[in-house]
Image: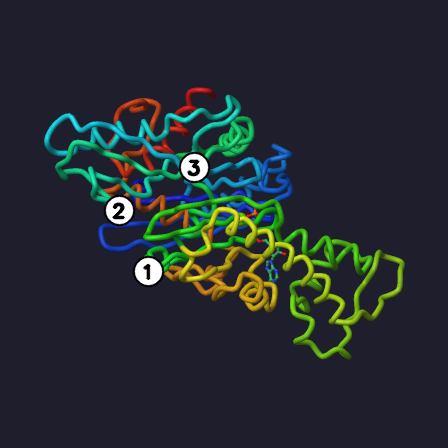
Amino acid sequence: MNEKNLVVALDIGTTKVCTTIGYHDQNDFEIIGVGSHPSYGLKKGSVVNIDKTVKSIHCSLEDAKLMAGVSEVHSATIGIAGNHIYCFNSSGVVAIKGKEITEADVNRVLEAAKAVLIPSDREVLHVIPQEFRVDSTTGVKNPVGMCGSRLEAHVHIVTGKTPLIQNILKCVEAAGIEANDIILQPIASSRSVLTDEEKDLGVVLIDVGGGTTDIAVWKEGSLIHSQIIPVGGNHFTNDLAVALKIPHNEAERVKINHGSVLSERLNQQSHITVHGLSGTKAREVRLGQVAEVLGARAEELFSIIKKQIDERNLGDFITGGYIITGGGALVKDLAELGEYILEKPTKVGYPRPFGGMTTVMQNPKFATVLGLLLESNKENNGTLAPKKKTSKNMGENLEGDLFTRFSSSLRNVFKEIF
Ligand SMILES: Nc1ncnc2c1ncn2[C@@H]1O[C@H](COP(=O)(O)OP(=O)(O)OP(=O)(O)O)[C@@H](O)[C@H]1O
Ligand SMILES: [Mg+2]
């Protein structure tokens, strides 16, 4: 097996750390290794315990390597989220020097769009072009080769707190690998779950993880808004633990095996047995009570999302509705309740199958890691992608797509720091 043909993705989540290894040749791309390990070192998407996080990364990496029959993995594409992430839209304008717009002009206008004041403790993670305007022509996706005198870029900028990004990178490096790219988790999940048609039509991807819910709003193929909401599946579990006075593990079992967010759908006479702390007697609780607790939290989550969408006047863009993914999407009847509160078509989104993918991987909780793998493969394969960054070629003006190039620039900053 040629090591150059391997691509690796690492999703460091609040409940699990997951590594996938893909192998590509000229025609095919397939998943050859997967490792998933419980995560104990993160809270709401941010690292709070470096040692525990490194251990989880190490275990998931070793499992994936073992499955793939690979002895060494040097680098991986990493996902990032956490409630320190802040995103906004910006724009820039430049005059065209020659007759035809060149790559250099595009770089200049993106630099101009990026030139906004951000707090000194923040770093730009992505500068994602939404559209270019050449004189009076709007909606241009790639202006290179067009003629004009004025080039305008509209971009979506993703920033994160420097120390918190550093913590993730430190953990990755301590586990013996380099981050060859850092990608915002809902962007990665969108990559594996959404179709181009959905992104064109206008949809909101909602990734309900353990610690956070990440949203990405797409319209005309571009990301127009992204946001991390500090409520996730763990809050549903904690609510059950508190309401039923049961340990967290038992609440998680009840949520997964018996949970629903619509109590009206349940037989009001149905009961389940729950186990309290050791030494206490098992009790019967109404299934309706479980659904009421989970339903209240789901209602709160969808109300927060609706408020964020309404406040930004994004409602009219969302013709295609809402697509819920992440492990938290598996709570029964969540999409039905979502559709009622969000007042748009809502469904659960599963990662699209691709080479070597088993049905086990076609689970919303693997949406992020599979999206990271697809992004990582695009880098290695592609006409669109930059050459892999090394300390030797750092600072060169690498060819590549703008999205990846700018996220790569952050990686370089950190390589220089460490
Ligand atoms: N079958 C299921 N039914 C209900 N909930 C589930 C199911 N499977 C997983 N979950 C919930 O999904 C959540 C974890 O989702 P996921 O694996 O996407 O999170 P993560 O990536 O580790 O966290 P984050 O993205 O917030 O950092 C947990 O709260 C878990 O209880
Ligand atoms: Mg996640």
Give whichever of discs 3 and 2 has the lower sequence position.
2
State the image coordinates of residue 235 (x, y, percent, origin top left).
68, 52
Q: Residues within 10 Å of mark 3 (few under 14, many from 20)?
A: many
Q: Secondary structure at mark 1?
A: helix
Q: Position of residue 337 (x, y in %)?
A: 59, 66
Residue at mark 2: 139
Residue 272 in the figure: left or right of residue 226: right
Q: CB of mark 3 within 8 Å of CB of mark 2?
A: no
Give amino acid for label 3: Ile
Between discs 1 and 2, the one toward the N terminus: 2
Question: What type is the residue that disc 2 sits on?
Answer: Gly
- Check mark 2 vs ligand 2: CB closer than 8 Å? yes or no: no
Q: Determine which residue is flagged by label 1.
A: 197
Q: How many marks?
A: 3
**Which of the two marks, 3 or 1, is nearer to us in this view?**
1
Pointer 3 or 1: first along the chain: 3
Could you tell whether 32 is left or right of 331 in the image? left
* Left or right of residue 61, residue 146 in this image: left
Q: Which residue appears at 12% of the width and 28% of the height?
A: 98
Q: Nearer the viewer, residue 18 or 262?
A: 262
Can the viewer see residue 416 in this picture?
Answer: yes
The image quadrant of residue 4 is top left
* 3D distance between C-alphas at marks 1 and 2: 17 Å
**Could you say whether the residue bearing mark 2 is in a helix, strand or loop?**
strand
Q: CA distance from mark 3 to mark 2?
A: 27 Å
Residue found farthest to the left: 99
Residue 312 in percent (x, y) is at 48, 46
Q: Is residue 66 visible?
A: no
Q: Which residue is mark 3?
A: 182
Per the image, label 3 sits on a secondary structure element best described as strand
Image coordinates of residue 6 in percent, x first then y, are 34, 44
The vertical placement of 302 against 13, above or below, is: below
